[in-house]
Amino acid sequence: MPGWSDVIRWTKGVVAAALGLAVVALVGTAVVRYAENWAIVELTRDAGFADHHPPAPDPRSEEEMESLRRFPAGAVPLQALIDATPTDGTLRLDARVYAAPGQITRPMRIDGVPGTVVDGGGIGSILTVAADNVIVSGVTFRNSGDRHETTDSAVRLRGRHNVMKDNIIEDCLFGFELRQADGNIIRRNRIGSKDLPEALRGDAIRVWYSNRNRIEDNDIVHVRDVVVWYSVETAITGNRIVDSRYGIHLMYAHKNLLERNTFLSNTVGIFLMYANDNQVIDNVIHYSQGPSGIGLGFKESSNTTVVNNDLFANARGIFMDASPYDPEGWNVFRANRIAYNGVAVSFHSDWEGNSFEGNAFVGNHSGVTVQGTGGAARNRWHANRWDDYVGFDRNNDGVGDTPYESWSWADRLWMDVRDAQFFRTSPSLELIDFVERLGSLIEPRLILRDPEPRFDLPGDIGARGTARPEKTP
């Protein structure tokens, strides 16, 4: 029979083994944490490289830029023709190549014909409009510079009440760049950027501190963003935006109208960031996919009206982050078709102040999700159509007899545990969910309640006549 010495020796061994395991665990945790942090730093550095280059190159003088430009043989200098055009006169350009740069400092009109090309020589911006009441139409702008720090653009607008219509922009870093330029019209242009990775391209249209502009019926493909900063009362209507990063991005931009635009295969369709009192009406947003894919996104934005839009097959149809930021500035979502998305509406946190009424939620993998704890029940949900509603309409009034309720069962485990997202729709998670619903050991979390769910699909739902982007030639 062992004596006390054996017990003490055994105890010391157990303690020593426990301390050894604790040290190993501590060292292992430290190594893993260091590796994770190092990986995050590396990932952040790589992800931020596009918008935060190494120090910008030294600025270049006009003489140096001119010496670096290279034009096709026979190119005619554009500036001399502009200087020779009288105030309020018209400069008609033939079907040939003209050499940039050009600057307009008084009211005039430039008309091109098919084959009229203004070449930037691969350096700087092509045309600067520093006057009011200028019209430029029918011109192909080609081959600007590629520097972001100087915003190398096809056309820089610095005046008011100018009209840029029916032009083509190709192989230019930025398209139209507006800076303190009010009341301009950009209409029916075809705009592309340079053939670069998504984040290194330029913006098709960049609006900075410029109010009451109209951006209409443009065809925009393979650019970075259409971005509106610190600007009010901009009307962005009837545009088609394909294969870009942000279709339309509002930053500190208020009282703007986004109507009848179509978006296809962008990372994000529309994103409102610190932007209030805007209207999003009759837009079609399709196939915003990938880890960052969002059809319509909000970040601290208030008092927005979202009506008659079609959000189809996006990773997340609607993404809400701390919106509305003004507790009295409700965001209203009405008569939208939110269909076949990975998640129909994703809340970044337990927030309130949004009203969803008369929308159709059809074919989405998940209806409404909330990251972390909490739910979306503090928002208003009323008279929406839910395709997973399991109630009846015995009196045939088009309204479900019982409320629609969404609960957080085991099938929502992936919302709280990031690694569990890999198992979405897997048989194992579905089985766990089935067992929990049969006999739940804990009370599930209520995500939302719609007291009067629509039993049929509303007739006025979704975009009203806006063309689907993949069907447009």
Image: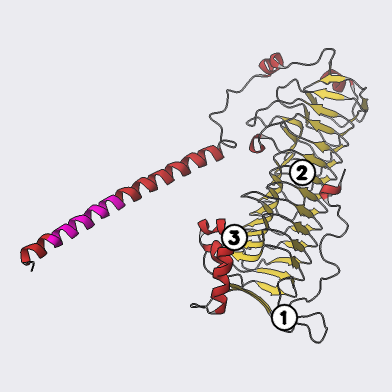
Between marks 2 and 3, how big is the CA–CA gap?
A: 29 Å
Residue at position x 31%, y 52% in the image: 25
Q: Are marks 3 and 1 in contact (CB under 8 Å)?
A: no
Q: Amino acid at mark 3?
A: Arg
Q: Can you identify the residue that label 2 sits on?
A: 242
Within 10 angstroms of label 2, few (less than 14), some, or many (20 or more) residues? many
Q: Can you identify the residue that label 1 sits on?
A: 391
Front-most of residues 202 and 130: 202
Residue at position x 75%, y 81% in the image: 400
Q: Amino acid at mark 2?
A: Val
| Residue 455 locus on image (x, y percent) | 78, 76
Q: Are marks 2 and 3 in contact (CB under 8 Å)?
A: no
The magenta segment is: 10-25
| Residue 248 locus on image (x, y percent) | 72, 48
Between marks 2 and 1, how big is the CA–CA gap?
A: 40 Å
Q: Can you identify the residue that label 3 sits on?
A: 424
Quadrant location of the N terminus in the rendered image? bottom left
Front-most of residues 44 and 26: 26
User: What predominant SS class does the magenta segment belong to?
Assistant: helix
